Amino acid sequence: MSRKIRYNAKARTDLNRLYDFLLDRDAATAERALDAIVECVMGLAQYPNTGRKIEQDGQLFRELVIPFGRAGYLALYQVSPAGDVNILAIRHQREDDYR
């Protein structure tokens, strides 16, 4: 069963921020990073429980590790009762936390 993937406004802002950061340095790397993030996130349509569990304030979240280069990225998401995947935030692994 394939589920819907939804990026909230915060996650879309994060994608733009991460892309712009790399674009200032190397356009090809920025494109590859964005492709890697989108490809890994799309895998959640088939396997939504792939990410590690994070429980906070009584809510269950999941975090997907997205390999890229020496560090990679992390995507914070929730799976809705209907099974759809809601991407809440995306960050580089070397960033302190989700902004």
Image: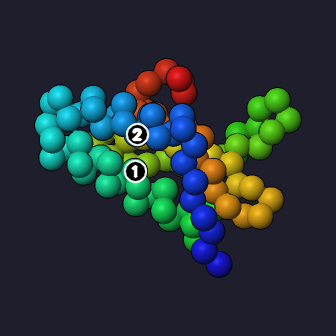
For residue 2, the mark is none
Crowd around label 2: few <14 · some 14–19 · many ≥20 (10 Å)? many
Tell me if I can see residue 47 in this picture. Answer: no
Task: Report the residue at 27% width, 32% height from top.
Answer: 20
Identity, as a three-letter code, of the amino acid under mark 1: Ile
Helix or strand or loop: what does disc 1 sit on? helix
Q: Position of residue 76 (x, y in %)?
A: 59, 41
**Label pair 1/2, CB-CB below 8 angstroms:** yes
Q: Is residue 32 left or right of residue 80?
A: left
Instruction: Mark 1 or mark 2: name the one nearer the start of the chain.
Output: 2
Would you name the residue on which mark 2 appears? 15
Q: Outermost residue, right direction?
A: 58
Q: Is residue 62 left or right of residue 30?
A: right
Q: Position of residue 74 (x, y in %)?
A: 49, 41
Identity, as a three-letter code, of the amino acid under mark 2: Leu
Task: Report the residue at 60% width, 74% height from top.
Answer: 2
Would you name the residue on which mark 1 appears? 37
Which marked residue is nearer to the observer: mark 1 or mark 2?
Answer: 2
